Amino acid sequence: MAGKMTGAPGTGILLVTANVGSLFEDPENLQKTWLREFYQTVQSHKPYFLAVHCQEVGGKNFEESMSHVDSFVKELLSSDAMKEYSRARLYLDENYKSPEQFTALGSFYFIHESLKNIQQFDFKAKKFRKVVGREICSETLESTPSLEKEKFPQEYFPECKWSRKGFIRTRWALADCAFDLVNIHLFHDASNLLAWEKSPSCYSGNRQKALGYVLDRITDQRYEKVPYFVFGDFNFRLDSRLVIESLCPTAIMQTCTESSTGEINQLIFRESDNDRKVVLLLEKKVFNYVNQDVFRENNGTSLLKFDRELSVFKERLHELEISFPPSYPYSEDSSEGKQYMNTRCPAWCDRILMSPSARDLVLKPENEEKSIVYDNIGPNVCMGDHKPVFLSFRITAGAGKCCQRGENIFREAPL
């Protein structure tokens, strides 16, 4: 990128979601590759406005890894690939000493120097403000007026155990159109065995409840309603019971139990002939299927019929067609780019979803189909256990006419 960007009409937008926990477990091997692939995506799509939603910032051992977060952020801001993004807002939840508030979310926004008509919403003043310079905010996000951050209520957490799950919301005005960007991290499947017990699994209910909470919060009466994009690690999983029945249609199941408790600790699915070959080994944190190619062939899209968790929200959330492989759980071995770990059934955990009015922004008739891309980043290299997912599109002049907004939404507050 050099100077003012030209090309297709409209303002280029790039939305990225990335669970970056792995980067801070092995920064020497993974961070450089991850950044290279990220920069290539930015340079390929040349957005004027770039939003990156990260989850698990700092990794699992966040107390020891926060120094790696600082170097990661410094590298992002000082890189040649990002030098023309003269304005930036980086929000990092690093308050790990406060477990009732800590979410480990990071929301990064970059604005190209040639984009003039961009403003950010002040939730306390209820007005938009000009965006000037670069700012990093990593303390007291709860009181930062330019965002809303919440951890889910404790009763929403499985077994009421705190974990780093919640959301961060920001609001932006671009020309005549305002929209919300919501970074989200929902609950995972703690046990493959429990997930298998019934369809849908008990875990999908936890995610449904939390996602419904977020949607209710961002569409309540406190602020004007605008189109919204919700992107992050939803931890959506394939319906385990149904997908295993599909993968092992003629297998015989063998149950193994813990001798001291009698609890099931392993399920072994064997072929009925062929020397009773093991097709699938299932444990609490083991999902070892004989043929991983089924998740890669045709980008695994034959399994999308088992991806059902979003159907509950079909009136409130939309998604473009998925044409990339399941985004999780990839091997964290830096020499492996396409191999899945044998820990969980591969699934499309990382997604970019949008309200009906936001979909209208993306799919306006003047937007050429080729200018809209929904894909992953780094398909052939190790990016950690999650592949980042991106959506590239353009907002054209007059797009704001489809926004649900009040007449006073674009009042600008003094600097």
Image: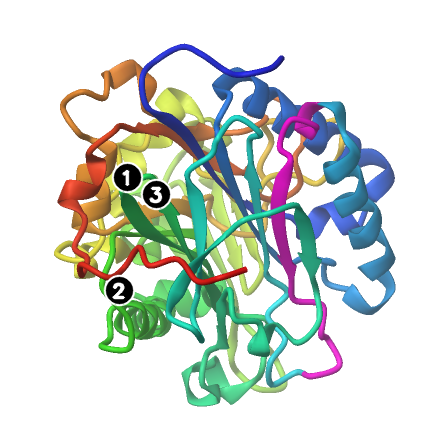
- Residue in view at x 78 percent, y 50 percent: 24
| Tag 1 residue | 304
| Tag 2 residue | 200
The foreground one among 200 and 197 is 200
Residue 356: where, in percent of width, then height?
17, 48
The foreground one among 46 and 243 is 46
Q: Earlier in the sequence, mark 3 or mark 2?
A: 2
| Tag 3 residue | 248
Distance from disc 2 to disc 1, alpha carbons, whole Å, reads: 15 Å
> Which residue, as the protein is rendered here, is positioned at the far front?
414
**Helix, strand or loop for disc 1:** helix
> Residue 272 falls in which quadrant of the image?
top left
**Helix, strand or loop for disc 3:** loop
Q: Earlier in the sequence, mark 2 or mark 1?
A: 2
- Residue in view at x 59 percent, y 39 percent: 330
- Left or right: 384 in relation to 397: right
- Left or right: 365 in relation to 120: left
Examine the structure image and report whether residue 350 is included in the region drawn in magenta. no
- When the figure is inspected, residue 62 is found, relative to residue 341, above or below; the finding is below
Mark 1 neighbour density, 10 Å: few (under 14) some (14–19) many (20 or more): some
- Where does the N terminus fall, quadrant-wise? top right
- When the figure is inspected, residue 384 is found, relative to residue 190, above or below; the finding is above
The foreground one among 336 and 117 is 117
- Left or right: 410 in relation to 269: left
Give the magenta range: 81-98
Q: For the residue marked with disc 3, what is the amino acid?
A: Cys
Residue 202: where, in percent of width, then height?
34, 73
Q: For the residue marked with disc 1, what is the amino acid?
A: Leu
Mark 2 neighbour density, 10 Å: few (under 14) some (14–19) many (20 or more): some
- Residue in view at x 43 percent, y 70 percent: 123
**Helix, strand or loop for disc 2:** loop
Q: Nearer the viewer, mark 1 or mark 3?
A: 1
